[in-house]
């Protein structure tokens, strides 16, 4: 069974993620406006730089607030988390923003600011799950007692005890039928 309150914790984390992201949208749009509108940079270059500014802003706030419980001493290197953040949510944001901006602005003729808001929304869901299950994993915590570790969500719904796999890892009955 899932630990008590894990759904509430996930919802709270989701809300924090989106609050940080909303501020990050301001950082991204402000950078885009300054660079494209103020300095006349090409909208794609300005978009890339705006996304990078938002990525760094969001990482710092997620590290200090959204997933604070997963960034304590012994939970892995902040540099490693920043690298994972760039390789996952950063890549989704950067590639997604550039491709969608090229489509929405370059092909469909939308203004760059509303187009950028649409691209940010399109990338948000993937970014939350990448952050939750890969970037800010509960490293160094006791996985059996940690209500934050993703394996706690893998308990069978039918109430039967989970089978043990290699090295004592928990597996659901469905996993044992697969081979």
Image: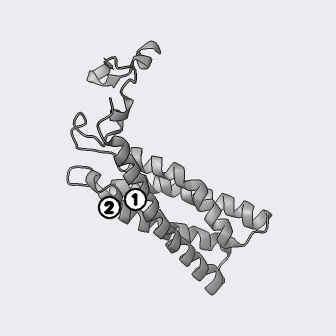
From this view, report whether residue 132 is shown above or below residue 152: below
Quadrant of residue 2 within the rendered picture: top left
Residue in view at x 40 percent, y 55 percent: 83
Q: Residue 58 or 13: which is nearer the viewer? A: 13
Instruction: State the CA–CA distance, disc 1 to disc 2.
Output: 8 Å
In the rendered image, the quadrant that contains the N terminus is top left
Callout 1: 10 Å neighbours few (<14), some, many (20+)? Answer: some
The image quarter in which residue 174 lies = top left
- Against 116, residue 71 (above or below) is above
Circles 1 and 2 in contact, beta carbons < 8 Å: yes
Which is nearer the eye, 162 or 107?
Answer: 162
Q: Is residue 4 above or below residue 117?
A: above
Q: Which mark lies nearer to you, 1 or 2?
A: 1
Find residue 16 and name its label: 1
Pick out the residue farthest to the right: 108
The answer to whether residue 179 of the structure is visible from this angle is: no
What coloring was used for the rendering? Answer: one colour
| Front residue of this view, candidates 69 and 96 | 69
Question: Residue 32 location in percent, x, y?
Answer: 59, 75
Which quadrant, please, contains the C terminus? top left
Q: Which residue occupies 71% across, 63% down?
A: 102
Q: Earlier in the sequence, mark 1 or mark 2?
A: 1
Query: x%, y% of residue 110?
Result: 75, 69
Mark 2 crowdedness (10 Å alpha carbons): few <14, some 14-19, many ≥20: some
Residue 153 located left or right of residue 41: left
Secondary structure under badge 2?
helix
The residue at which mark 2 appears reads as 65
**Image coordinates for residue 17, horizontal then vertical, percent:** 43, 58
Label 1: state its secondary structure.
helix
Image position of 23 with respect to 126: above or below: below
Q: Is residue 3 visible?
A: yes
Checking the image for residue 25, the label placed there is none
């Amino acid at each position: 069974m899932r630990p008590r309150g894990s759904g509430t914790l996930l919802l709270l984390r989701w809300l924090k993620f989106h609050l940080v992201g909303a501020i990050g949208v301001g950082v991204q749009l402000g950078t885009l406006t300054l660079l494209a509108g103020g300095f006349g940079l090409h909208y794609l270059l300005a978009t890339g730089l705006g996304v990078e500014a938002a990525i760094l802003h969001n990482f710092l706030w997620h590290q200090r607030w959204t997933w604070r419980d997963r960034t304590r001493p012994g939970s892995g290197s902040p540099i490693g988390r920043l690298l994972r953040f760039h390789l996952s949510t950063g890549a989704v944001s950067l590639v997604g923003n550039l491709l969608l901006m090229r489509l929405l602005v370059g092909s469909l003729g939308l203004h760059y600011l509303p187009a950028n808001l649409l691209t940010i929304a399109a990338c948000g869901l993937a970014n939350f799950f990448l952050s939750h299950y890969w970037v800010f994993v509960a490293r160094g915590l006791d996985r059996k007692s940690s209500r934050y570790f993703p394996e706690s969500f893998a308990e069978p719904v039918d109430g039967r005890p989970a089978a043990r796999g290699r090295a004592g890892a928990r597996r659901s009955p469905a996993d044992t039928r697969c081979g």
